[in-house]
Amino acid sequence: MCGIVGAFAFTDDAKSCFDLMPNAVALLSKRGPDCSNVKMLGNVCLGHSRLSVIDLSEQASQPLTDRTNRYTIVLNGEIFNYRQLRTELEQGGVEFRTQSDTEVLLQLYINKGVSCLDKLVGFFAFAIFDKQKNSLFIARDRMGQKPLLYCHTRNSLVFASEMKALTALGIPREIDKASLSLYFQLNYIPAPYTIFQDVKKLQPGYYMTVENGIVHVEQYYKIPAGQNFLHNITYEQAQTKIRELIAQSVADRMVADVPLGAFLSGGIDSSVIVAEASKLKSGIDTFSIGYADEPMFDETRYAELVAKRFGTNHHVYKLTNADLYSELYNLLNYIDEPYADSSALPSYILSKNARQHVTVALSGDGADELFGGYNKHQAAARVINGDWRLSALKLTAPIWQVLPQSRNGKLSNFARQACKMIEGAKLSAPERYWRWATLMSNEKAYDLLNRKLQLQEVSRRTKQILSKFRGGDDIEDILLTDMNLVLEGDMLHKVDLASMANSLEVRSPFMDHRLVNYVSSLPVNYLVTNNMRKQVLQDAYKNELPIELYRRKKQGFEVPLLNWMRGDLRSTIENEFINEEFLREQGIFNVSEIKLIWEQLLSKSPADAVAHMWAIIVFQHWWKKFSV
C-alpha cells in the first residue's frame, strides 16, 4: 500500500507545481513510510510514498520505469493475481527485473493497453505515463477500495491519493455547497464529488486518459446487479459456490512478504474471513476491540469464541472512554475532507494496535452491502413483503413518538429506529431509501447552511444517486444503490482512512469482483428475507462458526459521542465550533439552526442531534485546517 501523487502540466507555467511535489509526497508518508521518490518526466511529474508489502527490495521502489524508458508507473494498492499474470507475460517473452506486482501491472498495460484492467484481481489506484505519446493513463479499482482524487484546470491535471497532497500543490479551494449539503445528509461526500468545487474523485470502476490537454473519463466495470441470470441455481448450490469464491479470495489476499493478520469483531463477516484464513495459516494473529465502559456495545466475547474455535493468536483491546477520547484529535487531524462516520475512531484505534504486530490485515468489510446485512435491508423486505411486526409498529406509533429517542440506550434507540421505519414505510421506494440512508433531511440541511445552497444541483445529484431505482419496489435496487453509494463513500473510505493513518494495509476479501458478480446475480430472496439478513452467507458457514454468533443481534462500532458532547467536549464545542461570533464571521451556517441542534442534544430526547453535531464538529475542525 502506498500514496501516489502526480501532475501533468499543459503549459510551461503550470510546471511550477513540480517544485512543490516533494512536500506533497511527504504529506503521504503515513500511507507509505518506507521510502519516497519524485520523478520528473518532461511535462509530467510523479511522486510515490511506499509501504513495502510485496518485493521489499529497493529495485521495486516507485516511480518504476520499464527497460525502454518509455513507460513509468506509480501504484497504490496490490495486484493479487500478479504471479499468474507474470507467468503469462513471461510465456510471451516479457523479461522482469523485480519480483513486484507493480512491474507486472506495468508490463501488462504495455502489452494489453486499457484491457489490462479486465485481468486484474486486486485493489488499486495507479497512473502510467507514456513518454512517447506524452499521455497519462489513470485507473481506480472496481469497488473503490483505494482513493484517487484529481483537479483538472485549463493549465494542468493533478491527482493524488489524498486531498492534503492536492492542497500542497496549490489547487483551488472553493467549497462546493452542494457537496456540503450532501455531507450533512449522509455524513460523507459521495463520488465523484468532493468538498472543493474543482476537485473530483475518480469513481470506482473508471479510468482516465490525458493526452494533448484533453481529459477523458470512461467506465470499465459496473456491478451486474438486477439481472438475476442465476435463477436456476439452487440455494444449496449458491452456498457451495460462495464458499469456493470466498476461499479463493482469502487465499489471494494472503500473499505478502510481511506479517499478516486479520480483524475479528465477533460478527459473521470477519469470522468467515478468519475461518478461511485459518485453513491456510495456523495461529494467525487476530485483533478485536472491546468497550470497558460501554458493555452494551462490547462484542469481544464472541470474537474470543471464534478465535478459540480456529486457534488464532488473539489480541483483545478493551478500551475505556478515555482511551477513545485520547485518540480523537489524532483522527480529526488526519481527515482531509469532511467525513463524519464516528465508527472511524475505533477503526483507527484497532488499526493502530494491529500495526504493532502486522503490516497487513484481512477484514470482513463490504459483506453487509453485498449480502444485505443492514437493518434497512430487512426493514425494506418487511415493507415490500408485508409483515406483522411492521403493522404492530404502525399501531403503536404514538408510543414511540413520545418516548425519548437516543442511540445510548436500548429502549431509546429502538424508539428512534421505530419512528424512522414508520416514517419510511409511508414513502415511495427511492424516497424511503433516502430517508433511511440519511441522518438529516434535505430541508434541514438547507436550513442549517444559511440558505446558500444550489438547490437545483443538490436535487440533481440526489436523483443521480437514486437512479438505480427502476420504478418498482425491489430490494435489488436498494442493494445496488448501497454498493454504489454507501460502500465507496462511507465503509471503504473509513477502512482506507483508519488503516492508512497507521501505515497498515487492510484487504477485504468480500470485495473480490468475482464474488461480487456472483452474489449480485443471485435471487434476492437468497440474501434478505423478512426474518433474516445475509441469509445465504450465514447458512453457508453455519456448520463452521460457533452457534452463539447466530443468536446475537448485529452490533456496529459505537462511540459515546453524547457523553463527550455533554462532558469533555462541551466547552470546546460551545467556545470554538459553535461560538456565535465565529459562526457569523464564517458565514456558512444558520446560527439559529445550530442553536436548535445544540438544545436538542442537551434535551432528554437527542435523537439524531448527536450525529448532526458530530458532523458539524468534524467540518469545523477540517475548515480551520484546510479551507484557507
Image (cartoon, rainbow, N blue to C red):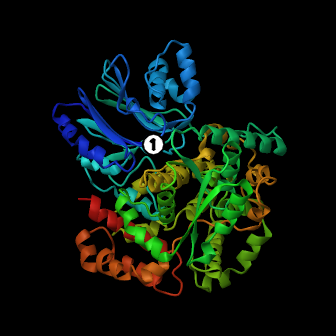
- Left of 497 or right of it: where is 230? right
Is 312 above or below relative to 37?
Answer: below
Q: Is residue 125 above or below residue 97?
A: below
Residue at 51%, 12% in the rendered image: 93
The quarter of the displayed image where residue 232 is located: top right
How many numbered marks appear?
1
| The N terminus, quarter of image | top left
Q: Position of residue 332 (x, y in %)?
A: 38, 64
The residue singled out by tag 1 in the image is 1
Q: Provide the secondary structure element on which disc 1 rests.
A: loop
- Specify whether 224 is left or right of 493: right
Name the foreground residue: 311 vs 404. Answer: 311
Q: Residue at x 34, y 50 (%)?
A: 163
Q: Position of residue 326 (x, y in %)?
A: 41, 71
Amino acid beneath label 1: Met
Name the residue: 23% across, 59% down.
Answer: 628
Q: Can you tell which quarter of the image residue 619 is in?
A: bottom left
Q: Position of residue 528 (x, y in %)?
A: 73, 55
Which is more toward the observer, 139 or 469? 139
